[in-house]
Image (tube, rainbow, N blue to C red):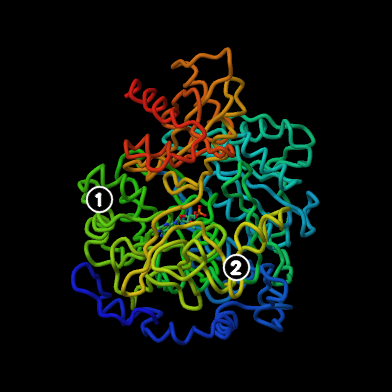
Amino acid sequence: MSNSKEFSPGEIYEPSEETRKYAWVNNERIYEMAQDYLTFWDEVAKNDVEWFEPYEDVLDDSNAPFYRWFVGGKINITHNCLDRHIKLKGDKTAIIWQGEPENEKEKITYHELYQRVCRFANALRTLGVEEEEDVVTIYMGMVPELPIAMLACARIGAIHSVVFGGFSSKALRDRINDAESKVVVTMDGYYRRGKVVETKRIVDEALENAPSVESVVVLERTGNDVNMVEGRDVWWHELEEGLPDKCECRPLDSEHTLFILYTSGTTGKPKGVLHVHGGYNVGTHITTKWVFDLKDRDIFWCTADIGWITGHSYVVYGPLSVGATVLMYEGAPDHPQPDRWWSIIEQYGVTILYTAPTAIRYFMKLGEEWPKKHDLSSLRLLGTVGETIDPKAWKWYYKHIGNERCPIVDTWWQTETGMIMITPLPGITKLKPGSATLPFPGIEVDIRDEKGYSADSGELVITNPWPAMFRTLWGEPERFAKQYWRSNGGLIYYTGDGARKDENGYYWIIGRIDEVLKVSGHRLGSAEIEGALISHEAVSEAAVVGKPHEIKGETPVAFVVLKTGYEPSVELEEDLKKHVRNEIGAIAVPEGIYFVEQLPKTRSGKIMRRILLAIEKGEEVGDITTLEDVTVVEKIKEVMMARK
Ligand code: WT7
C-alpha cells in the first residue's frame, strides 16, 4: 500500500466503528492480499458468481490489448441475476418502480422478474433474435421493462444496445445503423416533468433511414396515440401472448458479448464500447457488494438513467447479481416539487443513494429546506460518480442528506472500465472530500507524465487488465487498440483523465484532458457537437468548448464561422441550437453561440480550443505563437465583448 504516510489532521472522515464492524470489507490487508491480482480475481470469480462450466485460465493476455478473462468458462449473467436467487429468495423484491405520477408504482419480486424476463426472451425469439451477432436496440424511459428487455437479450445470447431516451431521432438512427440492429424495443411514451415524451414517434423518425431494422416492439405505457407500421411494429403485450414464462438460460462462453453502449470520444462518431458476460459479471458484482457494502436488507437507489453505463452496471447487472432490491424512478428529480427524491427515500426507506455531483449541486442550490421536510434516517451510505465532486458539495451532501452519519463513496470509472475502479471501501477508507481515494483491490493505477514516466500529476493510467474491461469497440478493433493502449513496460490503458496523487497515495481526478466534455455528468465530444453544427447549411466551421457551469459542471459553448451569404442573427443562433437538438439531443445544445470570422488555428490547421476556452473564461490566452494568424484572438474577443 502506498499510503504509508501519516494522514495530516484536518479534512479526514474516518469510518465509524459501526460501519467498520459490519462492512463486507473491514480489514486494510485486502489491498495486500489482492496484489497478486490474478489470484484475487480468481477467488472472486469462484466465490461470488456461478459458472455452468469452470474456466481453465483466469486471463489470456497473449493477444493484448484483446484480453480474454476466465477462458473457456461457461456462464450467463442472467443466471447470476435471476435463476440462482429464486430458490432462496424468490419472494424478495428485486425492483421497486416508482413512476413520475405518484400513484403509479410497482414492486417486482425476483421470481416475477425471472418470469417476465423469460417470457420476453421467448418473445424476442419469435422475432428471430437468436444468434450472438444480433443486436437489439432498446430506446425506452425508466420503466421495469427496460431492464427486462436487457436481461431477455442476455438470456438468449443476443447483444443489447441501449440508447439513452434523451437522444434525438438522428442520434438513435446513427446508433441503430452502426450496430445494424434487427430489432428495436421501445414504448409509446414516458413521463418527464408531467409531460409525455413521445418515444415511439422519435423511433419512427429514426427508422426512416435504418434498413437493418425488421421489427419494432412497442410497450404500452402512457397510452398516447402511436402509429403502428403494419408488418414491422408489434405491441409488447401482444407479442408475449401465450408464450411460456420459462426460457432456458443459455450457457455462453465467458467472452460472449453482453452489450454495446455508445459513448463519446474525440472524433465525431460515437464509439460502441463492448462488454462481455463473464468478466463484466465478476467486476460489477464485487464492486456493487464491496463499494456500496450491499446487504440483503438494503434498498439501493442508483439514480442514473439506464441509458448510461452507471445504470447498466449499478441499476441492473451489479445489484441484481448480488440479489439486492433496487429502486427505479421514472421521472424528473424536481417534479412535482423539488423534494421528490427525498420523498421517495422516505417512502421506500432507501438505505443507499448513488448519484452525480451535478444533482447534488442542483439540490444545494434549491436549499436544504427541501430535504429537511423528510425523514432520511433510513440512509446509511451515499455515493457519487461522473465527475469530480468539489469539497463544498461533498460536505453539503454529507451534512444535509447523510446527516453526518453516512460515508460517501466517490467512485471513479468510465464506460470503458465497466466497473468502479478508484473508490473508498466504506468500512476501511479514511475519506477526503474531493478525492476518489484508492484503487479497488486488484486494480493497479498510476499517473504518467507526457514522456510516459510515473509522476505525481499527469494522466491517469491503468497498468493491469481487469475483468470488466471493455473488450473492443464495435466494428473498430484498430481504434480500440490504437487509441487507448500504449506499451511502456507492458501495455498500459490511458484514461483521458488528468489526475494527481497526494502524500497518502490518494488520487484526485482533475478532469478530461482530451476534447471530451462532461455536461451534467454526461459525456459529450467537442467534435460530435461541432459535427452537428457543421451539418447545418449556414455553417462553414465550428469549435466547441466546455465552459464551467455552476450546476452542470460544464456546458458547451460554440464558435461558428458562417458560410458566405449568411449573416449572424439571433434567429440563426436559435436555429442552430434547434439543429443541434435534432442532431444529438437537448444535452448537447450550446448555451451560447458566437459568430466569428475565423477560428484560432495552428499552421497545420488544428483548432486551438484551449485559446477559445481561455477567452470565454476571460483568462490569459497564454502562448499563441503557434497560431497561423495571431490577430484572430483580438477579433474573437471583440465579438464576445459585444455580446456581453
Ligand atoms: C469520465 C467517464 C462511469 C461513470 C459515469 C461516467 C469522469 C467519472 C468520476 C469521479 C471524477 C469522474 C471522468 C471519466 N468521472 N467518475 N468519481 N471523479 N471524475 O462514465 O460517461 O464514461 O465518463 O467521467 O472524467 O473519464 P463516462
Percent position (x, y) of residue 105?
Answer: 45, 49
Q: Residues within 10 Å of mark 2 (few under 14, many from 20)?
A: many
Q: How many marks?
A: 2
Query: Which disc number belongs to residue 280?
Result: 2
Percent position (x, y) of residue 591?
Answer: 41, 31
Q: What residue is at 26 percent from the left and 43 percent from the top? A: 365
The answer to whether residue 211 is visible is yes
Whether residue 44 sits left or right of residue 98 in the image: it is right
Q: What residue is at 63 percent from the left and 43 percent from the top? A: 269
Amino acid bearing label 1: Pro
Amino acid bearing label 2: Tyr
The correct choice, above or below, for 29 with respect to 492 in the image is: below
Mark 1 or 2: in front is: 2
* Element at label 1: helix
* Element at label 2: helix
Percent position (x, y) of residue 372?
Answer: 21, 51
Whether residue 419 sits left or right of residue 332 in the image: it is right
Viewer-side residue, 70 vs 387: 387
The answer to whether residue 81 is visible is no
